[in-house]
Image (cartoon, rainbow, N blue to C red):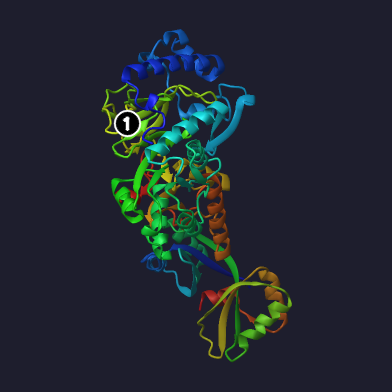
């Protein structure tokens, strides 16, 4: 159930993000979700793509610093309090969230959220047990 | 009070040569008998103490390099037993090892004497109030100026570095007449004064003795104008004794070297030949009264020239011109000696493998800044901001511990730092055009 997320180190200077996306585009890799964490000096670009292994390889070949991590994709009801339900489950189990970001899916009544947590397998179990919909990797890659 | 010690300060060249010769002969004997490392060097080129009959023979002797001090770390070059050493100072070295200097009671006395001369050059006497804003500690600046100021009977304020607002308040309230610190700190104080709304007319400051880092004539003008004082340049290095090896007089046309204690030479750093008076080359010092760590022909790596003409002040001491550069890659940042290779040792120690780094030295406002660029590696990288910031913090802390000054660490993308064949470019010094 875990989704591979590619992270890329970016210095804060113009044109870098364009280079990453162009590299992926040139290799026919499709981006389904992305987020950037930025500090004063650098940024970390986090990407969900349809071909994570290949993305990691081509980015490294083009001189980027890349790492790969497991994240969880969940679908919550697109209504007030929808996300809170899922987060309460994790809080109850003392699973801390490193970061999360929402992304656009094709379902109409669901909001999709990616979570980076300390114990991803355990998180998937407790979320599923509580009736939260966890998306499979393939579902996410092909969005 | 015009001179502190006119006997030596105004001695004729002939007499000075005689004094120097006697003291050199004695020093060479002591070093030969008590410092095996240097004895080996002499024996290797077939020189014995008996071959040294006057200053003329100085050029026969082998050089001493910083490397010799490193090879014999910590006390191997000391010429007296530790029971005779009353003080130890140290300055940063290139590989994390410090350069250690030991002083006997007489050495401390000599140091106070040469510093006393320098302070008198700046127009101070026993009625003066001298604020020492050089750092106190292993660094020789603070204590060196302190002992010299006490020697002339002035009232000394051992303010040490930092705490600028309080320094300025003291300067005003205590009626400080003379200030000793780095020139960049003097300028910083002038700015802070403005911010505090204190005018230079409210101070009793007359002169400042500034050193421990290179500074330009433009900086001198700025300090003199902003603080309303005479700014004089002082030179020294801990291996030789500390501050006070040489200092400008009120005419500000070169720094008088206390030649009764230190013999200067200018050499070609490549051929190692002694150059004729007036030539520009590497400054070399031989100490002729020191007991703890006497040094024969010590290579300072500083580039300067010597002027033997008599000065308007009446002193006959030779004058050295402002140091215009280095023959190695040492930087002076906020008065602290920094070798780029120290950063390399930190990176290796911390364990991230990219040995690529770049030092960017600048002057923001009046203070030197150091930024260290380090390339991000796969091993260091994480998708978590927190992890990367932890690494930045760790590197910054280690760099601070090793260099003794604070630095900003900036992580850059791989292959950002220029690679070059042979000697890598490790430093961008933006202060040069100030």
Q: Which residue is mark 1?
A: B319
Q: Quadrant of residue B284?
A: top left
State how many labels appear. Answer: 1
Q: Where is residue A6 shown, x and y percent of the image?
A: 52, 66
Name above or below for residue B418 compared with residue B287. below
Query: Quadrant where the N terminus of chain B lies?
Result: top left
In the shown orientation, is residue B288 left or right of residue B401? left
Q: In front here: A44 or B431?
A: B431
- 10 Å neighbourhood of mark 1: few (<14), some, or many (≥20)? many
Q: Is residue B98 visible?
A: no
The residue most toward the top is: B50
Give percent across and percent down for residue B63: 42, 22
Q: Chain of mark 1?
A: B
Of B93 and B387, nearer the camera is: B93
Residue B411, position in %: x, y?
47, 57
Q: Is residue B270 visible?
A: yes
Q: Nearer the viewer, residue B32 or B8?
A: B8
């Amino acid at each position: 159930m875990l989704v591979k997320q590619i992270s890329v180190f970016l210095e804060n200077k113009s044109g870098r993000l364009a280079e990453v996306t162009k590299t992926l585009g040139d290799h026919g890799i499709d981006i389904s979700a992305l987020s950037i964490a930025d500090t004063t000096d650098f940024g970390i670009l986090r990407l969900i793509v349809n071909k994570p292994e290949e993305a990691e390889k081509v980015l490294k070949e083009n001189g980027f610093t890349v790492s790969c991590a497991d994240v969880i994709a969940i679908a919550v009801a697109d209504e007030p309090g929808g996300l809170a339900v899922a987060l309460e489950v994790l809080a109850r189990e003392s699973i801390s969230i490193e970061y999360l970001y929402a992304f656009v899916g094709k379902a109409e009544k669901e909001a999709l959220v990616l979570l980076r947590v300390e114990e991803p397998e355990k998180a998937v179990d407790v979320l599923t047990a509580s009736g939260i919909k966890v998306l499979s990797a393939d579902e996410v890659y092909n969005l | 009070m015009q001179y502190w010690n006119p006997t030596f300060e105004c001695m004729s060249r002939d007499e000075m040569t005689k004094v120097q010769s006697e003291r050199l002969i004695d020093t060479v004997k002591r070093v030969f008998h008590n410092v095996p490392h240097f004895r080996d060097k002499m024996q290797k080129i077939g020189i014995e103490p008996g071959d040294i009959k006057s200053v003329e023979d100085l050029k026969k002797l082998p050089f001493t390099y910083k490397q010799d001090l490193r090879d014999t770390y910590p006390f191997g070059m000391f010429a007296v037993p530790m029971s005779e050493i009353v003080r130890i100072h140290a300055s940063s070295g290139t590989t994390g090892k410090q350069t250690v200097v030991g002083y006997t009671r007489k050495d401390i006395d000599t140091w106070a004497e040469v510093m006393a001369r320098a302070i008198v050059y700046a127009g101070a006497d026993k009625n003066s109030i001298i604020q020492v804003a050089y750092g106190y500690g292993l660094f020789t600046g603070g204590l060196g100026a302190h002992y010299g100021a006490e020697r002339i009977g002035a009232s000394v304020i051992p303010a040490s570095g930092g705490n600028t607002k309080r320094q300025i308040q003291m300067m005003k309230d205590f009626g400080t007449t003379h200030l000793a610190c780095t020139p960049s700190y003097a300028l910083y104080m002038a700015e802070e004064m403005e911010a505090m709304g204190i005018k230079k007319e409210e101070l009793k400051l007359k002169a400042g003795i500034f050193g421990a880092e290179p500074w330009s004539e433009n900086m001198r003008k700025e300090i003199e104008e902003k603080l309303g004082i005479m700014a004089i340049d002082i030179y020294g290095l801990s291996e030789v004794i500390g501050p006070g090896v040489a200092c400008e007089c009120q005419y500000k046309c070169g720094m008088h070297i206390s030649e009764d204690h230190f013999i200067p030479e200018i050499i070609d750093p490549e051929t190692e030949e002694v150059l004729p008076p007036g030539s520009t080359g590497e400054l070399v010092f031989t100490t002729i009264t020191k007991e703890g760590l006497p040094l024969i022909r010590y290579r300072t790596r500083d580039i300067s020239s010597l002027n033997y003409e008599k000065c308007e002040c009446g002193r006959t001491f030779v004058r050295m011109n402002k140091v215009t550069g280095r023959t190695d890659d040492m930087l002076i940042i906020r008065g602290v000696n920094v070798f780029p290779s120290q950063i390399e040792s930190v990176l290796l120690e911390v364990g991230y493998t990219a040995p690529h780094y770049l030092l960017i030295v600048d002057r923001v406002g009046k203070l030197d800044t150091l930024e260290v660029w380090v390339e991000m590696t796969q091993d260091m990288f994480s998708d978590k901001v927190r992890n990367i910031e932890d690494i930045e913090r760790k590197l910054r802390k280690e760099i601070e511990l090793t260099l003794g000054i604070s630095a900003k660490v900036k992580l850059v993308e791989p292959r950002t730092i220029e690679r070059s064949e042979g000697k890598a470019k490790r430093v961008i010094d933006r202060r040069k055009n100030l």
